[in-house]
Each structure stands twice: as C-alpha cells, then as structure tokens.
Image (tube, grey):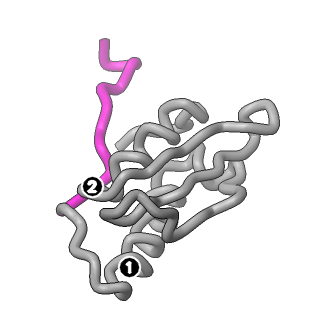
C-alpha cells in the first residue's frame, strides 16, 4: 500500500475510485488540499468534495477510508460502481 502520497498521486487514485463515473480531482492551495467532483452518467455533477486535506490524502489508509465512504454515498443513490481497492506501488526502499 502506498505511503506518503503526493497530491498528484492522490488525485489520480481519487479519480480511479468512481469508475464507471467520471471524477475530476485537482490539487490546490499549494498541494495542501484536493477537491473533486463526481459526474453522473449524463455528465452532470452529482457529488462534490471541496477540501480533502493533506493529512488525509497523504496517508493511504485515511484516503482509502474516505473514498470508501464516498463510494457508499454514491451507491446509496442507486449507482453501481466497479470494484475498487487502493492501488499499491513498489516500495522504493526495496529497489
């Protein structure tokens, strides 16, 4: 499981968590926050998170917990998402 994620890595993970829906995540505030929007099948915004703070998105377990909560909110709207789990990345210390 990745540790100490950068804002760009976390944004990519967030976008991948809501397939088949479109999700756009963007770091802002000098990469201290990430905001994201999820769009329905008609490409209309259906859910928005304005500020995922660095302590949450840098920690893989915290980010995974948050994304699973948001996925649950989407599922309660009757939308079936593709199976998802937090991606792993090679440990740079093992190289």
Q: Residue at x 60, y 39 (%)?
A: 26
Is the Cβ of the residue at disc 2 closer than 8 Å to that at disc 1?
Answer: no
Q: Residue furthest front?
A: 42
On the image, the x and y values in percent for residue 40 come to 38, 65
The residue indicated by pointer 1 is 72
The quadrant in which the N terminus is found is: top left
Q: Residue at x 72, y 46 (%)?
A: 33
Q: Which label lies toward us, 2 or 1?
A: 2
Q: Residue furthest left?
A: 83
- Does residue 1 lie above or below 81 as drawn? above
The residues tagged by marks 2 and 1 sit, at their Cα atoms, a distance apart of 13 Å
The residue indicated by pointer 2 is 19
- Return the residue nearer the eye: 1 or 52: 52
Which residues fall within the magenta stretch?
83-95
Q: Residue at x 37, y 52 (%)?
A: 22
Mark 2: few/some/many CA within 10 Å (<14, 14-19, 20+): some
- Does residue 53 lie above or below 75 as drawn? above
**Mark 1 residue element:** helix
């Amino acid at each position: 499981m990745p540790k100490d994620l950068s804002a760009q890595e976390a944004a990519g993970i967030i976008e991948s968590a809501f397939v088949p829906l479109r999700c756009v995540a963007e770091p802002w505030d000098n990469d201290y926050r990430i905001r994201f929007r999820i769009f329905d099948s008609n490409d209309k915004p259906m859910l928005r998170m304005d500020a995922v703070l660095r302590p949450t998105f840098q920690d893989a377990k915290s980010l995974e917990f948050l994304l699973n909560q948001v996925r649950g909110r989407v599922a309660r709207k009757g939308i079936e998402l593709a199976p998802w789990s937090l991606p792993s990345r090679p440990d740079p210390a093992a190289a």
